[in-house]
Amino acid sequence: MHTQPTYRGFFILLLLLLAGAFLINVSLGSVSIPFSEVISGLTGNGTTKASWQYILIEYRLPKAITAMLAGGGLAVSGLLMQTLFRNPLAGPFVLGLSSGASLGVAFLILGAGFFGGVMGGFLTNEWSLVIAAALGSFLVLLAVLAVTFKIKDTMAILIIGLMFGSVTAAVVAVLSYFSNAEQLQQYIFWSFGSLGNQSWQGVFILSVCCFIGFGFSYVSSKSLNALLLGENYAKSMGLHIKKTTFLLIIATSILAGSITAFAGPIAFVGLAVPHVTRQFFKTSNHFVLIPAVLLSGSLLLLICDTIAQLPFSEYTLPINAITSLVGAPIVIWLLVRKRKLLF
Amino acid sequence: MASEKKTTVLEASEVSVGYSSKKKAIAIAEAISFSIAEGELVALVGSNGIGKSTLLRTLAKMQPELKGTVSLKGKNINEYTMLQLATEVSIVLTEAPASQNLTVLELVTLGRQPHTNWMGSLSEEDISIIQNALLVTNTETLAQRKCFELSDGQLQRVYIARALAQDTPLILLDEPTTHLDLYHRASVLKLLKKLTKETKKTILFSTHEIDLAIQLADKILVMTPEIAYFDTPKNLIEAKRFEVLFPEDTIQFDPKTGRFTVKN
């Protein structure tokens, strides 16, 4: 009798690691807070110093939650893209989704100069960044998809994704040229990627977006499994290709768009995490893979963030640099070891 | 001859297949008519580019027919939704599954999709159908292997197992014997023959193995540029239908052996 494994052990291990990484993440920072104080602060028993409580609740906790949401969300959107395009290289970054989101944000921040004061009040609203970024990534994804329907070659699609990336960079460069120093700085800091400085309202908005994205992804699991056989087989098994593709694109652009809006463009998580996860969860079943990739992505970004804040120092490195430094070697190692990337 | 009246499963009348763009329709093959009864093994032969794959795709409603009607169990296929059709027709394509990382069990299990709920949860019945599909195709020992580890012959059996798991009365196969050596070609076709005999499935497959098809198929659909002939192998040989299959300058058909030989 053949049964499909449930990987319960791996899931428990992942959850434990995630809990551990979470505690380490909130315990470390520029201000050293004793571990026992962290625990009592988090459990609501208060800390001996009021400032510690404030740092924990208003700074470290939202940052850790943002890291988990962003890591999980990017990883899941990478998995969706890899299955949708049936290409192991696909990911929100490679396909130009993050560039699209950047373009949206660039228009909002840098374009404010063009449109005058009308946008001024709009800018301060946190939703506007999210909407601009989600719209940007949605438009790029639609463009990539329009090309997909015309060109069957997935390699061409990736190249087109890269082209969108360079067009975006060019447009951003033009916008930067015409904007003032303050706007430019605001945009540059956003583009470094930052998980910190999130208000609880921001964290709430991000969680709503991510959970909508996760929900859409999870209910698409059966369709995603069918897509593994290719479009024609999926069709022959009664799958509504257009509806599925549309749902997946919505899910991906909500995830990639909202995360990029809040945390900036974060590289490599979307591409690398699904591949790393597949090393442990040797299955193609998306009902298992989606939660597994979600947890692994959260874990990875939480660890990257712990490294980025350079424990016991006042410096915080751009998270985007850290994920690339961690992610690129992983992808190279996988390629060298396995000699091919499968999805 | 036809003492017992069999139910017709798949019927095509005056069907043209091809591609239509905004401006015009380009027919690849025209005026195809046939009627396949339950439990029949039917081979589809013709030279490269004659439209065998296009016809199979049209029969599976993966692309629209240009003219004529295709009916399944007496009902026009256009009246079926894709999901309804998925419980009536399964297909084995020439293309490999997009993901090579699937295990055999996962791939065969995917065949149950049209029958399961949104979670894809498997009932006892689903599991026993999957088990049976693996058993019949002799792939149960491969269940935990990944697709990229398998040979072409094993893969073909696995694809057939997936179609069997879909549990449809009609199975269409597009060149199931390509890339296989003679032994595996014969064993795949024998497997198809066994399925039609033992499980009353109706099977239509395209092939270049004309000699094997003549020996094993109940009926053959011979596609030529002008017209498609549909009859039993014996009648087709008598009517000299295979002679016109290919240009006569290089090979010729020997009616006695049912084989093509190279002209000297």
Image (cartoon, rainbow, N blue to C red):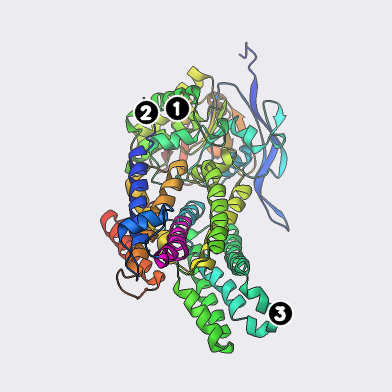
Magenta-span inclusion, residue A54: yes
Judge depth for marks 2 and 1 and give the one in front: 2
Residue farthest to the left, as pictured = A337
Residue that label 3 marks: A118
Image quadrant where one finds the N terminus of chain A? top left
Q: Position of residue A84 (x, y in %)?
A: 51, 52
Q: Is residue B238 above or below residue A317?
A: above
Magenta-span inclusion, residue A264: no
Residue B236 in which image quadrant: top right
Residue farthest to the front, as pictured = A48
| SS for dot 2 | loop
Q: Is residue A320 visible?
A: yes
| SS for dot 3 | helix
Q: Chain of mark 3?
A: A
Residue range (magenta): A50-74
Q: CA distance from mark 3 to mark 1?
A: 63 Å
Judge depth for marks 3 and 1 and give the one in front: 3
Question: Residue at point 69% right, 84% down?
Answer: A116
User: As shown in the figure, which amino acid type bears the numbered disc 2?
Assistant: His
Residue that label 1 marks: B130
Q: Is residue B7 above or below residue A195?
A: above
Residue that label 2 marks: A2
